[in-house]
């Protein structure tokens, strides 16, 4: 390695997949007692994509991964690892990641799934960054892929209007760079299992007698979200000796427009610096941050060299932040 350079994880490609079928708030109002006004005012959501039966987490994750590799110009056989964050895997096992591996022809990689609900992408990024810094891998796909429509209770208007399906992927590659000049600068992860009852899937594999559907105390999640997310973003800035003035973009988990706005405001960012896709995608859990990143990188808003702050909170509770210079 040349003098003064350090090994870091650099984001070189991003890809996405959204199911063809779009369901508007008005269409949701035909299924449950709700309205476009209520959903828009409380959450900022206008529509969501719902997967067809063939659009599984593996199918969507593979499509997103293919695009990320193509954008980076990297052959699937050069991928060393696939980390797929999901709460809605195709099967309990094998991991959805190995189905993606087979589908894209990444036969030299190892793959595993990661369960951290809506924080899954930040957790995945953190694990991948650790593997790259330690020299265990050079090229890692981090994928968020979710089909929440399979675990929604379509009789509970308090939750079924909030979520959507989709996938996105990033390719992280080892590069020797000047400190702070490029790549994942830091990740910070947290969980508190004492808050597990606030947001969970009722049963499923280990408790087949239960419903297998998502349950949420939205008001309590909301209350914790603003405080915990603000502390996670401050933690990221402090750890890097940076201030809010150094941030170019906030790419937050897309759960609720009000949560996004209040974290952005606490950080002192302008509305234009905060990437919002919750209006189009609703909450796609582990896929929401990379989908938002994809959108803002593809439309030319986020530019090479800029500093991007990511944050998320989800079932667990889990939460965390990541700081990346692109
Ligand atoms: N349409 C119309 N009315 C509704 C709907 C609906 N879809 N849902 C609930 N209501 C009603 C309720 O029944 C209640 O009526 P009542 O006062 O007569 O009892 C009223 O609206 C208010 O309900 P609240 O739940 O208190 O509404 P609130 O303002 O808290 O908004 C929301 C609910 C949008 C869910 C909000 O709490 C929220 O966004 N929470 C955070 C969710 C989140 O961040 N999740 C992230 C993690 S997700 C993951 O990890 C998988």
Image (cartoon, rainbow, N blue to C red):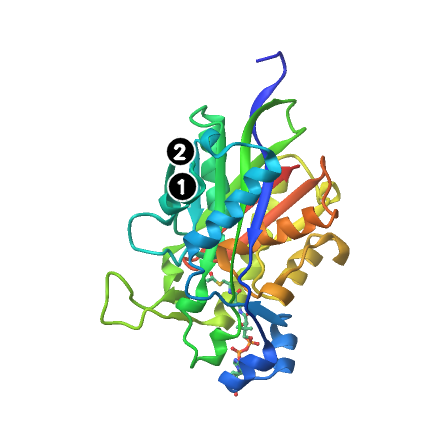
Q: For mark 1, does the 10 Å Cα neighbourhood hold few (<14), some (14 to 19), or many (20 or more) residues? A: many
Whether pointer 1 and pointer 2 mark residues with C-beta atoms closer than 8 Å, the reply is yes
Q: Is residue 240 visible?
A: yes
Report whether 165 appears left or right of 43.
left
Q: Is mark 1 within 8 Å of ligand 1?
A: no
Q: Residue at x 60, y 81 (%)?
A: 26
Which image quadrant: the C terminus?
Answer: top right
Q: Position of residue 144 (x, y in %)?
A: 49, 51
Q: Residue at x 45, y 68 (%)?
A: 149
Asked if 116 appears above or below 172 in the picture, the reply is: below
Tell me the element at label 1: helix
Q: How many marks?
A: 2
Q: Which residue is mark 1?
A: 101
Which of the marked residues, 1 or 2, is nearer the chain's N terminus?
1
How far across and how far down the image is residue 270, in percent?
77, 55
Q: Position of 277 compared to 75: left or right?
A: right
Dot 2 surroundings within 10 Å: few (below 14), some, or many (20 or more)?
many
The answer for how far apart the CA atoms under marks 1 and 2 are is: 7 Å
Q: Is residue 87 above or below residue 233?
A: below
Can residue 120 be seen here? The reply is no
Residue placed under numbered mark 2 in the picture: 109
- Image spot of residue 283 (x, y percent): 54, 63
Residue in the image at 55% along x and 59% along y: 18
Which quarter of the figure is the N terminus placed in? top right
Residue 140 position within the rendered picture, expressed as x and y whole percent measured from the top left: 48, 35
Indicate left or right for 317 with 177 as reference.
Answer: left
Q: Nearer the viewer, residue 297 or 311?
A: 297
State the SS at label 2. Answer: loop
């Amino acid at each position: 390695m040349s003098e003064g350079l350090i090994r870091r994880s650099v984001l070189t490609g991003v890809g996405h997949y959204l199911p063809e079928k779009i369901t508007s708030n008005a269409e949701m109002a035909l299924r449950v007692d709700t309205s476009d006004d209520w959903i828009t005012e409380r959450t900022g959501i206008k529509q969501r994509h719902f997967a067809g039966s063939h659009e599984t987490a593996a199918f969507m994750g593979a499509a997103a991964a293919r695009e990320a590799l193509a954008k980076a110009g990297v052959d699937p056989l050069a991928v060393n690892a696939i980390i797929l964050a999901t709460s809605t895997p195709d099967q309990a096992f094998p991991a959805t990641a190995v189905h993606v591996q087979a589908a894209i022809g990444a036969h030299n990689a190892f793959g595993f799934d990661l369960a951290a609900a809506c924080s899954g992408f930040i957790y995945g990024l953190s694990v991948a960054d650790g593997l790259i810094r330690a020299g265990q891998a050079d090229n890692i796909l981090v994928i968020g892929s979710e089909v929440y429509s399979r675990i929604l209770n379509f009789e509970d208007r308090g939750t079924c209007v909030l979520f959507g399906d989709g996938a996105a992927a990033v390719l992280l590659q080892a590069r020797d760079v000047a400190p702070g000049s490029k790549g994942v600068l830091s990740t910070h992860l947290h969980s508190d299992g004492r808050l597990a009852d606030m947001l969970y899937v009722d049963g499923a594999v280990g408790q087949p007698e239960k419903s297998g559907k998502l349950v949420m105390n939205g008001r309590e999640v909301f209350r914790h979200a603003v405080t915990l997310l603000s502390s996670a973003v401050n933690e990221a800035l402090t750890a890097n000796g940076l201030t809010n003035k150094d941030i170019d973009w906030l790419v937050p988990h897309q759960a609720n427009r009000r949560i996004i706005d209040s974290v952005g405001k606490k950080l002192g960012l302008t509305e234009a610096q905060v990437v919002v896709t919750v209006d189009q995608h609703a909450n796609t859990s582990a896929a929401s941050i990379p989908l938002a990143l994809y959108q803002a990188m593809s439309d030319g808003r986020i530019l090479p060299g800029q500093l991007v702050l990511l944050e998320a909170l989800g079932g667990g509770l889990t939460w965390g932040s990541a700081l990346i210079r692109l």
